[in-house]
Image: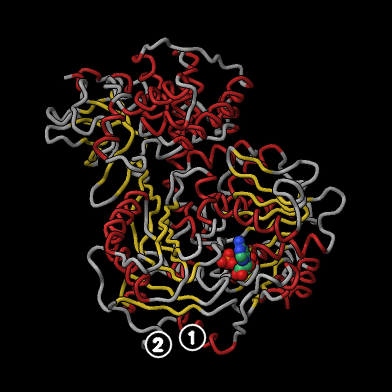
Amino acid sequence: MQFWKPGTAAPGSSLDRATETEQNVLSSAPLSAAISVQSARERLPIYKHRDKLLYCIEKHGVTIVVGQTGCGKTTQLPQYLYEAGWAVDGNVIACTQPRRVAATSVAQRVATEAGSLLGDEVGYTIRFEDVSDKERTRILYLTDGMLFRETLIDPLLSRYSVIMIDEAHERSVYTDLILGLLKKIRRKRPSLRIIVSSATLDATSFLDYFNAGNSPDEATIISLEGRMYPVEVGYLQESTPDYVKKAAETVWNIHMQQTPGDILVFLTGRDEIERCLEDLSEYIPTLPRTAPRLKILALHAGLSTDEQLAVFEPAERGTRKVIVSTNIAEASVTIDGIKFVVDSGFVKIRIYNPTSALSSLATVPVSIASATQRAGRAGRTSSGICYRLYPQSALNTLPRTTPPELTRTDLTTPILQLKSLGIDDLMKFEWVTSPPAESVLRALENLFAAGMVGEDGRLTVIGEKVSECPVEVNIARMLFQSKEYQCGEEMLTIAAMTTIQDVFIIPDGATGALAELERRKFTAEEGDHLTLLNAYNAFTRYGRSSSWCKSHALSFRAMSRAVSIRAQLKKYMQRFGLPVESCQGDARRLRQCLVSGYWRNGARWVADGTYRSIRGNVTLHVHPNSVLFTRKPRSGWVVFHEMEETKKTQIRILTEIEPDWLLEYGHSFKDKRTGASASSTHMQDIQA
Ligand SMILES: Nc1ncnc2c1ncn2[C@@H]1O[C@H](COP(=O)(O)OP(=O)(O)OP(=O)(O)O)[C@@H](O)[C@H]1O
């Protein structure tokens, strides 16, 4: 392998130097299976800071905790608080996570350590899944989005005595929003304590944020020294043109040359993960008979909770487990047995162009903070090695942190939610980092155009209701509009099916071509939304069986999740008095209803087979999974669900529409041939 030999490499980033020096300092006594949970907890580096932490949390409103990955922040701090009495009198200790896999797996671990059944004293809440007990749960792990949603019902979050915002370095939209709200809540409810924690945090900027406008001892910082086990870091000598192939090759070399221990690989998305799994499966037949086996697993957001949790199961004896993951395993997660991390150095993030009002996913180099977190997935239950698939010199070009999501995302849904909390003056909201004015303006325009905000800038009745729905504004809007088109039954299904990902799969033992043939059985020529609807209807018609799914190349778990999400959304429909009626196969009405949600994502077919977005005139390529990949829509116009920047800009889940339906939403754009401006008063320009 072309890696610098770890340890012999020229000194690298401060991260790597810190790692190297710590090797000498740390105890490397392995955790034997026999030692009790309690003594295992006492061995964690955070333990010696327990009293100091509890003292600071008692004394200060906000405690900012920075400590190396794996030192015990996520699992131990809530337990210390519990033991110190912060959960008496019905109080709850909350700990937020940016991702559901972290919330569920950490809750499981803490329940085990605390001797609780999961969902009893220790529980978790993620979107569409609540494994907690309103009366009994005392330590609750939840995604930051769920905590934010709770403020809509209880603005002072009165059931919580302490709220820990973990992995705050990720600066997800909801982390930032919730921090802004917590600062406000603290002024009204000084008994509430806030903890902001991470291994890779710019602590002073958070300190300044919380102290501004408050007493100077409102917030304090605690740095926890000590790391669990050392992690060596190796780099490629030269950058690689294909990091997916290199990742598979590196896994293979580790398997052939290194001591036992599982491997965690970081790539950017499902497509890359599948390519890597394919590359690895080509190596497997060459495995010598006497060599240990390889068990290869994927981990990404499109999987169900059960599928995600399957990666935590230990491999059989004599088998090395390889988990090929997106960044969802990057922070907070401990997968016991991981000794090697292979880091591609890239991540897929959402970016937003306020000028074109288009949101997309783009693959970009990771930040130093992310690279540190990834390396930190090893060294948790034994020492480890992290192989970075880029040269050490590239570290100098990496950003320190990823820009806060609020500064690079469509703010329509967050602003709707802030407004429903009565925060109408967005300039007065204490943002941790202010979002770009143009994005705020666009979001307000969108909400106004969708009838959710009135001329006075306040939420309308429908805006109030939409803000309660646990789905994006565009999807919620389609649910509300379904009343007009009498297609609530179908819209519920489409909303649920677009919320889950990766419905169509290649079952074990099948080929891609065979799966494609099966998939065609559901194809609706109007497009992907209706194809998803067909798949769902067939699934329920044939008894929701897993064997039926397997023979039709559908993911049983994804379909079951769609059933559960649909049932939950249906309750919202009923609460809002929206009829759940069927359009009886009237695809036209369905497509019209889709436009009510996706009107911003309209695109026009051009002769070379690509599309141009209505806003921004961006060249768009159809994702090969779409049923419109090889076919021109009859009208030449589509709306799409999602856009992704790979080497080109791809759109996924599209459905054919009529252009005049878009005009109802005030679209204004130019006709290519005539150069004339089109708007609702210039319909003929579009129809020409
Ligand atoms: N599922 C598990 N199996 C075995 N050990 C675990 C498990 N979960 C946690 N641990 C142990 O507890 C330690 C502390 O984990 P914890 O998640 O609390 O650390 P952390 O400081 O929050 O790390 P990070 O900053 O990476 O989230 C781990 O290093 C590991 O030794």
For this orientation, the residue located farthest to the top is: 584
Q: Quadrant of the C terminus?
A: top left
Quadrant for the N terminus, please.
bottom left
Mark 1 in CB contact with mark 2 (< 8 angstroms): yes
Residue 444 shows in this picture: no
Q: Secondary structure at mark 2?
A: loop
| Residue depicted at x 48% and y 75% | 384
Q: Position of residue 534 (x, y in %)?
A: 38, 22
In the rendered image of this protein, does residue 105 appear above or below residue 237?
Answer: above
Q: Quadrant of residue 295?
A: bottom left
- In the rendered image, residue 600, in percent from the top left (x then y), is placed at 36, 32
For badge 1, the amino acid type reads: Glu
Which residue occupies 53% across, 27% down?
A: 566
Label 1 neighbour load within 10 Å: few <14, some 14-19, many 20+ = some
Looking at the rendered image, the disc whose residue lies closer to the viewer, 1 or 2, is 1
The image quadrant of residue 227 is bottom right
Vertical placement of 636 versus 581: above or below? below
Instruction: Check disc 2 and report the residue beneath it.
Output: 11
Distance between the alpha carbons at the discs numbered 1 and 2? 9 Å
Outermost residue toward the front in this view: 289
Nearest the eye: 517 or 78: 517
Question: In x, y percent, where is residue 326?
Answer: 42, 55
Q: Kindly identify the amino acid type of the residue bearing the numbered disc 2.
A: Pro
Q: Which residue corresponds to mark 1?
A: 20
Residue drawn at 36 percent across, 28 percent down: 599
As helix, strand or loop, the secondary structure at mark 1 comes to helix
Crowding around mark 2 (Cα neighbors within 10 Å: few <14, some 14 to 19, many 20+) is: few
Q: Is residue 653 left or right of residue 482?
A: left
Vertical comparison of 111 with 440: above or below: below
